Image: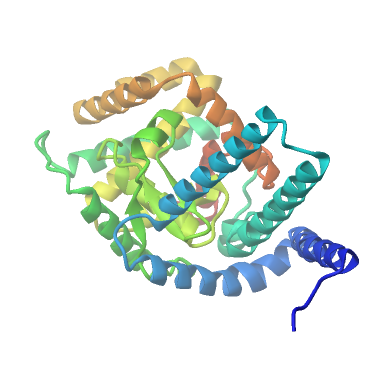
Amino acid sequence: MKVTHTPTLLRYKSILALIIPVVLAVVVFVFSYFPAFIEKYYSSKVYILISELQRIVTSVVSFSLGDICYAVLIVYIIFYVVKFVMLVIKRQFSLQIVGKSLFKGIKFLLWVYIVFNLSWGLNYARLGIAYQLQLSNSTYTSQELQDITCEILDKLNNSRLALGDSNYQYPSNNIIYHQAFEAYQTTKNSFQFLNYKHFSVKPSLLSTMISYAGYSGYYNPFSGEAQLNTDLPKFITPFVSCHEMAHQLGYASESEASFVGFLAATHSNNPLFVYSAYFDMFMSANGELFEQDFYSAYLNLKQLNSFTKRDRKAYRDYVLGKQNNMQPVMSKIYDQYLKANQQKSGIKSYNEVIGWLIAYKKKYGTF
């Protein structure tokens, strides 16, 4: 017997299909205003299980499943945009078609919002590293910034000398990724909450594109993979690996991910990782100092040893060589994305890692 559906029943099902994601999206949004609840139940329990399962699944293959999914989505969107344009050109569209397309688009975006937040995004609302280490990431003075920059400078020079002469042979990217995993295994002895399991760090299939967009790596919240830009100078890659792995552990804030990555790299037994972490931290600290005390920052650059000066030049050449008109646009988009996810400073939040470092030193006396 053939079952027929009345227009009223179809409308009812359509409304129900939209109500469900709307209700779930509202519930997720409300939960984001309870950081203690998020920290205790989501970030420390639910997310740990989700992320570990993601990494177990994606670690089966060496290439990035997340990048492939993004590529398929882009092709899918382009296909429907072209299809819609063709309908307009042929004058075959109607308000009914527009309404159905809008309905599907809203429903799709709602489900993306829900899945994104449940799989990772709620970590933006957690208490995070400040709660775990009992730190107060308060404002700091220009003198405190200058003092911490000088300390980083000394550690940077010493860590570069520990690598030996200028003929230091960097390992391959894949080896560096696995060494980053080993760094976290060492770090968890000091910080139990940095217990990284089930390695899933991949070279990005879009390295050339993200280089020109100005990014060194990214985390895919839908697949749980950490994607690394393979075009980076090798001495930067260890710290970036630790940074992206921090995202996998649920540290959504860029400043927190950088600080956690710094802890992992500097607590490792690998001198390259120690150097990479201090290099990145010095670039952030001295860059901020330039805005407050140009002469002191300039003198710091003069005190770098010859090996580190060479690496700084190589890094600057890399950055300048990738500059293009797309970068400001991508930076603006990412800035708005971060602000929409409770990072009020937007893209400037990367430099807030210095605040965590100063707070850590105040509490523990060293870093």
Give the mark count. 0
Q: In the image, is residue 53 above or below residue 211? A: below
Q: Can residue 354 be seen in this snapshot?
A: yes
Front position in the image: 261 or 175:
175
Q: In the image, is residue 318 above or below residue 68? A: above
Q: In the image, is residue 54 above or below residue 2? A: above
Q: Is residue 139 left or right of residue 152?
A: right
Q: Is residue 184 left or right of residue 175?
A: right
Q: Residue at x 33, y 21 (%)?
A: 321
Residue 217 on image: x %, y %: 41, 44
Residue 325 on image: x %, y %: 48, 19
Front position in the image: 309 or 334:
334
- Its colouring scheme is rainbow
In the picture as drawn, the residue positioned furthest to the right comes out as: 8
Q: In the image, is residue 45 above or below residue 22? A: below
Q: Is residue 34 left or right of residue 237?
A: right
Q: Residue at x 73, y 55 (%)?
A: 107
Which quadrant, please, contains the N terminus? bottom right
Front position in the image: 72 or 98:
98
In the picture as drawn, the residue positioned furthest to the bottom comes out as: 1
Residue 297 on image: x %, y %: 43, 22
Quadrant of the image occupied by residue 31: bottom right
In the picture as drawn, the residue positioned furthest to the top comes out as: 295
Q: Residue at x 18, y 44 (%)?
A: 162
Q: Residue at x 31, y 44 (%)?
A: 237
Q: Can residue 303 be seen in this snapshot?
A: no
Residue 337 on image: x %, y %: 63, 40
